[in-house]
Amino acid sequence: MLPFTLSICGLDELNGFLNTGVTHVISILDPDYPVPDGLAKIASENRIVFRFDDATVPGAGRIHPASTDIGKLVEWSRSLTDSQVKHLLVHCHAGISRSTAAAAIIVA
């Protein structure tokens, strides 16, 4: 069991979650998508943004997560202390694949 609440959502649910006591956010956005305005509610040191496409096979113009992205995710999540984190939100566009994969890495 995690010592904090972990939620996963898509962009359509983001603002609703940000009003529920979220203290930390992992955002996974398409490369050219702007950072959602609502994230300004979360202190910059309590959020991290990754930018890559939701793609499982290589394709022209697609940006895939690199091993450095995974390393950065692991390092950032390990730097958090239980006392800091009350509610961690992981989101991507749909709240299905990228965010769920990131959450699985965090709890592993």
Image: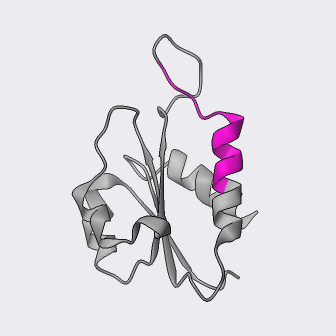
Left or right: 82, with 84 as reference point: right
Q: Quick one: which residue is furthest to the top in this view? A: 60
Its colouring scheme is one colour
Q: Position of residue 70 (x, y in %)?
A: 68, 45
Q: Quadrant of the N terminus?
A: bottom right
At a point 48% along the width and 69% down the height, the residue shown is: 46
Q: Position of residue 10 (x, y in %)?
A: 37, 54
Q: How many marks?
A: 0
Direction from residue 2 to residue 63 in the image, left or right: left
Q: Position of residue 16 (x, y in %)?
A: 27, 71
Q: Is residue 66 above or below residue 27?
A: above
In reply to whether residue 69 is colored magenta, the answer given is yes
Query: Residue 31, position in %: x, y?
Result: 40, 32
Q: Is residue 30 visible?
A: yes
Whether residue 9 sits left or right of residue 67 in the image: it is: left
- Looking at the rendering, in which quadrant would you find the C terminus? bottom right
Residue 21's place in the image compared with 53, above or below, is below
Q: Nearer the viewer, residue 39 or 58?
A: 39
Which of these two is toward me, 22 or 10? 22
The magenta segment is 62-73
Residue 97 visible somewhere in the drawing: no
Q: In the picture shown, does residue 85 fall above or below 107?
A: below
Residue at (56%, 54%) from the top-left corner? Answer: 100
Q: Residue at x 47, y 32 (%)?
A: 53
Kindly indicate the quadrant of the structure image that contains residue 68: top right
From this viewpoint, which residue is outermost toward the right?
108
Residue at 61% across, 50% down: 101
- Magenta region includes residue 16: no
Name, please, the residue furthest toward the front: 45
